[in-house]
Image (cartoon, rainbow, N blue to C red):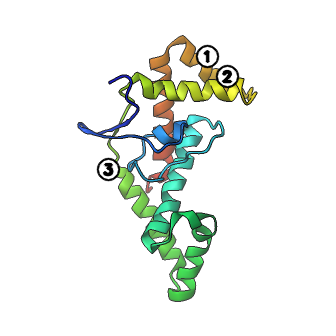
Amino acid sequence: MDSFVYTAYARKGWMVPNQYWTPGALSPMAIMGKYYMYYGQDFITPRELGKKGAARLRGELILDNLGICRFHRNWAEEMAPEIIDSLYGLKKQFTENNHITAGRINSRNSSVFWESDRSIDIVYTFLKRKHSLDNNNDKELIKWINFFEKNKHEAALSFWYEMHKGIQETLREF
């Protein structure tokens, strides 16, 4: 199983990540296999990555709930609440309901820490490439690379859990 890249979910669920070789594609989101996560190529601290993933969940839910193709997200996520307001006068309620829905979906999040070494290696390799190929010398990036070099599994668990905390902080309802 160590050569299989996947995200584990609950006791028997799993999903291969979208074909973006970034830590966000392996983030502990409540729904995987859609684009309900941040999959950018930039280095972001894991906690911020979790927050960006949670924001993507909210944005994608707007599109899904209105039947708008996600390829129009650059304009539609911003304009959709305005359209709802102009049609029904319910912009505030629409936005609040979207946040509540995202929080409730996340309340059932049963993501499991990466089970395969290959999934861990994807994250570690991404970090190393950001430093060596992109010449990114961000102190946080270097800290994470050193942590992975010292203890790959402990660093991976900390990275995963930091993402998880960012998601929880963003999507909690209180």
Q: Residues within 10 Å of mark 1 (few under 14, many from 20)?
A: some
Marks 2 and 1, Cα distance to the nearest angstrom? Answer: 6 Å
Residue 55, quarter of the rendered image:
bottom right
Q: Residue at x 52, y 81 (%)?
A: 84
Name the residue that disc number 3 marks. Answer: 108
Q: Residues within 10 Å of mark 2 (few under 14, many from 20)?
A: some
Q: Is residue 14 visible?
A: yes
Name the residue that disc number 1 marks. Answer: 146
Most extreme residue toward the left is 12
**Disc 3 or disc 1, which is closer to the eye?**
1
Looking at the image, residue 83 lies above or below residue 148: below
Question: In terms of sequence position, does the residue under pointer 3 or pointer 1 come before the other?
Answer: 3
**Front one among 136 and 151:** 136
> How many marks overall?
3
What numbered label is drawn on residue 115? Answer: none
Cβ atoms under marks 2 and 1 closer than 8 Å: yes
Marks 3 and 1, Cα distance to the nearest angstrom? Answer: 34 Å
Which residue type carries mark 1?
A: Asn
Looking at the image, residue 125 lies above or below residue 60: above
Marks 2 and 3, Cα distance to the nearest angstrom? Answer: 34 Å
Which residue type carries mark 3?
A: Arg
Q: Residue at x 53, y 29 (%)?
A: 123
Q: In the structure shown, which secondary structural element does the residue marked by tag 3 occupy?
A: loop
Image position of 135 (left or right of 121): right
Image position of 49 (left or right of 100): right
Q: Residue at x 61, y 27 (%)?
A: 127
Q: In the structure shown, which secondary structural element does the residue marked by tag 2 occupy?
A: helix
